[in-house]
Image (cartoon, rainbow, N blue to C red):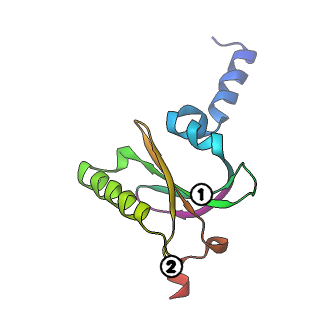
Amino acid sequence: MLSVHGAEEIARARKKSFFVRHKASMEVRKKYQPSRQVLGQGAFGVVLKFVTKEEPKTDVAVKIIRKERVNANQMQIMKDEIAIMSRFDHAHVIKHIESYEDENYVFMIMEALCDSVELQSIL
């Protein structure tokens, strides 16, 4: 049986951010601070607002994709998307800044749209 102190430690460990548990997320956390604002959500993951740690502070969107929800074909499409986005530098295309990957997740760091405006709400 666990002591109260031991149970409290386990509870605190479980409450720790998901970012502490994954290698790629550690790389993301070195450069970006999460704001906990959800910009979007989909079948494969979530897009969160982060802020760069270096000056000038800049908002970025971090698309976090859970690999367990993506099949091999979808993973290849996602990698192609990253390759294509990396080549664009245009005012009307969201800029891909960088990506990180570990055994469980893919993190795509992109410029953030103004105030989390859903494209669908504009159309």
Q: Quadrant of residue 101?
A: top left
Q: Report whether 69 appears left or right of 109.
A: left
Q: Report whether 75 appears left or right of 63.
A: left
* Closer to the camera in the image, 62 or 57: 57
Which residue shows up at 55% across the image and 86% down it? 122
Determine if the magenta segment contains residue 37.
yes
Identify residue for label 2: 92
* Closer to the camera in the image, 66 or 9: 66
Which residue shows up at 62% across the image and 31% down it? 14
Find residue 37 and name its label: none
* Closer to the camera in the image, 30 or 1: 30
Task: From this view, report whether residue 98 is shown above or below residue 25.
Answer: below
Place of residue 63 in the rendered image (x, y in percent of width and height, measured from the top left) = 51, 56
* Mark 2: amino acid: His
Place of residue 17 in the rendered image (x, y in percent of width and height, measured from the top left) = 64, 39
Determine if the magenta segment contains residue 57.
no
The mark nearer the N terminus, 2 or 1, is 1
Place of residue 120 in the rendered image (x, y in percent of width and height, measured from the top left) = 50, 81
Where disc 1 sits, the SS reads strand
| Quarter of the figure with the N terminus | top right
Mark 2 → mark 1, Cα distance in angstroms: 21 Å
Where disc 2 sits, the SS reads loop
Identify residue for label 1: 48
Which residue shows up at 67% across the image and 61% down it? 59
Q: Which residues are magenta?
A: 35-43
